[in-house]
Image: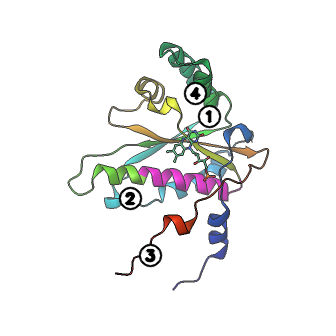
Amino acid sequence: MTTPNQAALDFLLSRRSRPIQTLAAPAPDREALAPILTAALRSPDHGKIEPWRLMVLQDGALTRLSKLAETRGKALGLEPEKTAKGVDMFAQTPLCVAVIASPEPSDKVPEIEQILSAGAVCTALLNAALAAGWGAHWLTRWVSHDRTFVEEGLGLAPHEFVAGLIHIGTETAPPPERPRPDPARKVAWVGE
Ligand SMILES: Cc1cc2nc3c(=O)[nH]c(=O)nc-3n(C[C@H](O)[C@H](O)[C@H](O)COP(=O)(O)O)c2cc1C
C-alpha cells in the first residue's frame, strides 16, 4: 500500500457543489485556472483517445451565449421561466468551462466508454475547482441539448455534445448539506 493521502480522502468525503446562484466574481484567472484544467484533463481515458475538449467561456462569450439562449428559448416556444434558466446560466456566471464530448470512431474503445470519460473530466474539473477553494457547479439545462444552440453558439460538430457546463467563481453563501446515498443500500458485497 502507498502512503495514504488523508487530506484528499477527507476532501472527497465532504465535497459538495456550490449552486450557480451563490457564485460571484472574481472567477479564477488564467493562472489560477491552469492547474484546475490540467487536473481535469488527467482523467481516465481508455486508449488515450482524448475524446473530449474544453472551452473556457468568459466576458463577451457569456453575453453572446445568454443572448442566443434568449433567442432560442423564444424560437422553441419555451416557458419564460425555462428560457430564463438558459439565459441566466450565462448572464449570471463568473466563468463557465464547457466540457465537450467528442467521441471518435474506434474498433477498440466503444463510444459509451468515451462518453463516460467525458463525464470523468467533468467530475475532475468540478473537484479540482472545489479543492482549489472556488465554488463550482455542473449544469447542463436545456441549452446543452438544443442542437442549434450548441452548434451555432459553441461551434460543436454534429457528433459532439455538451457533457457539462462547469460554472466556477467565488462562493458567497455556503450551501445546505444535500442528502447523500446510504452505502448499505447502494453497495453489494459479492464474495462468490
Ligand atoms: C450530467 C449532469 C448534468 C446536470 N445538470 C444539472 C442541471 O441542469 N440543473 C441542476 O440543477 N443540476 C444539474 N446537475 C446536478 C448538479 O450538478 C449536482 O449533481 C448537484 O447539485 C449536487 O452536486 P454535489 O454532489 O457536487 O454537491 C447535473 C448533474 C450531472 C451529473
Reading the chain from its start, which is encountered first: label 2 or label 4?
Answer: 2
* Residue 3 position in % (x across, y down): 58, 83
Q: Amino acid at mark 4?
A: Gly
Report helix, strand or loop for mark 4.
Answer: helix
Q: Quadrant of the C terminus?
A: bottom left
* Residue 130 position in % (x across, y down): 66, 55
Q: Which residue is mark 2?
A: 45
User: Is the CB of mark 2 within 8 Å of ligand 1?
Assistant: no
Reading the chain from its start, which is encountered first: label 2 or label 1?
Answer: 2
Q: Which residue is mark 3?
A: 189
Judging depth in this view, the residue of 59 and 136 nearest the camera is 136
Q: Residue furthest bottom?
A: 1
Q: Quadrant of ligand 1?
A: top right
Reading the chain from its start, which is encountered first: label 1 or label 3?
Answer: 1
Which residue lies at the image location 54% right of the left edge and 69% below the top edge?
184
Mark 2 → mark 1, Cα distance in angstroms: 27 Å
Judging depth in this view, the residue of 175 and 53 nearest the camera is 175
- Start-end of magenta stretch: 118-133
Q: Nearer the viewer, mark 2 or mark 1?
A: 2
Q: Amino acid at mark 1?
A: Gln
Q: Which residue is mark 4?
A: 86
Q: Amino acid at mark 3?
A: Trp
Reading the chain from its start, which is encountered first: label 4 or label 1?
Answer: 1
Q: Which residue is mark 1?
A: 58
Q: Main secondary structure of the magenta part?
A: helix
Residue 38 visible in the shown view: no
* Residue 6 position in % (x across, y down): 65, 76
